[in-house]
Amino acid sequence: MAETIQDVPVKKIFSDPLFNCRGAIAPIDVVELARDIERNGLMQPIIIQPYSNNSKYDYRAIAGHRRLKAFEVLKLEVIPAIVRQNVDEGAALITNLSENIQRKNLNILQEARALEKLKTKGFTVDSVAFALGKSTTWVRMRYELLDLPEVIREAAAAGYIKQNQIRDLYRIKDESKQIEIAKKIKSAREKGEKSHHVIIKKKRNIFKAKQRDVNGIMEMMTHIQNHIGNNFGTRCLAWAAGNISDLEIFRDIKEIATTANIYYVIPGERDML
């Protein structure tokens, strides 16, 4: 059955800030939207449901809280709306979240807080991912951010903590350690370090061979330097991490070969002459 649009009195619709994933909306937040509606009209109706918890209202807004506020700012009496009957709270939250989550100006913490009501109600990562058309990784990362200390959440919102680091911090169960490492990451980023090498140590399987990322290479190089000092091994790791050029490592090899009376020619050396 197709949904019908009807004009509903603005004053009869409750914009519940505790329900809306973006919270309360102030008139100043919708000034530009109100101007656009005044010029071009409403492009998309709001979605509402019957509401009986307050004698002042007949409906509660599910989606379109900003549009509703813009109509209030414009002092318009009625607003085009789709009335959905028999919508349970979970489905209403999903509808509200789906609209808001598509907005490009949300940071990761705002997205996480939008998911918080669903997480609290016991919605699984898989069910939320399916309902929103998002990956399970996308949802899980935001669920995990909600479980981290507020100082880390704010650092993630500001862009200091990246998504892969959220997962690493979440795996550390000591809150003071989480905060300590997060502060180091933030400090490194504030200094403009391209690769700050703040290592979040995980349980290491020393029997498993795998391709290493730059952090893993630098961690091993630091380990060698701390125990036996700089040597050809650390130079090789520096080369693998991209910190020194091919020519520099070739010259190191030649120096070692010469000391051992081994004939060695740097690749491309004749072309450099």
Image (spheres, helix red, strand yellow):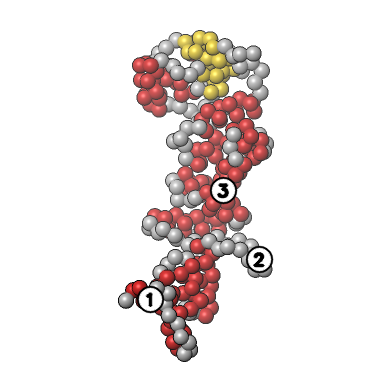
The answer to whether residue 104 is seen in the rendering is: yes
Is residue 142 placed above or below 103 in the rendered structure?
A: below
Q: In the rendered structure, which disc, 1 or 3, sits on the residue that comes first in sequence?
A: 3
Do callouts 2 and 1 mark residues in contact (Cβ within 8 Å)? Answer: no
Residue 261 pos. (x, y %): 47, 90
Q: What secondary structure is found at the residue carrying circle 1? A: helix
Residue under label 1: 269
What amino acid type is highlighted by mark number 2? Lys
Q: Nearer the viewer, residue 148 or 215?
A: 215
Q: What secondary structure is found at the residue carrying circle 2? A: loop
Q: In the rendered structure, which disc, 3 or 2, sits on the residue that comes first in sequence?
A: 3
Residue under label 3: 148
What amino acid type is highlighted by mark number 1? Glu
Residue at the location (44% across, 65% down)? 242
Residue under label 2: 208
Q: Quadrant of residue 31?
A: top left
Residue 136 pos. (x, y %): 62, 42
Q: What secondary structure is found at the residue carrying circle 3? A: loop
| Residue 118 tag number | none
Residue 52 pos. (x, y %): 62, 15
Q: Distance between the residues labelled 2 and 1?
A: 38 Å
The nearer-to-camera label among 1 and 3 is 1
What amino acid type is highlighted by mark number 3? Leu
Is residue 123 placed above or below 53 in the rendered structure?
A: below
Q: Quadrant of residue 244?
A: bottom left
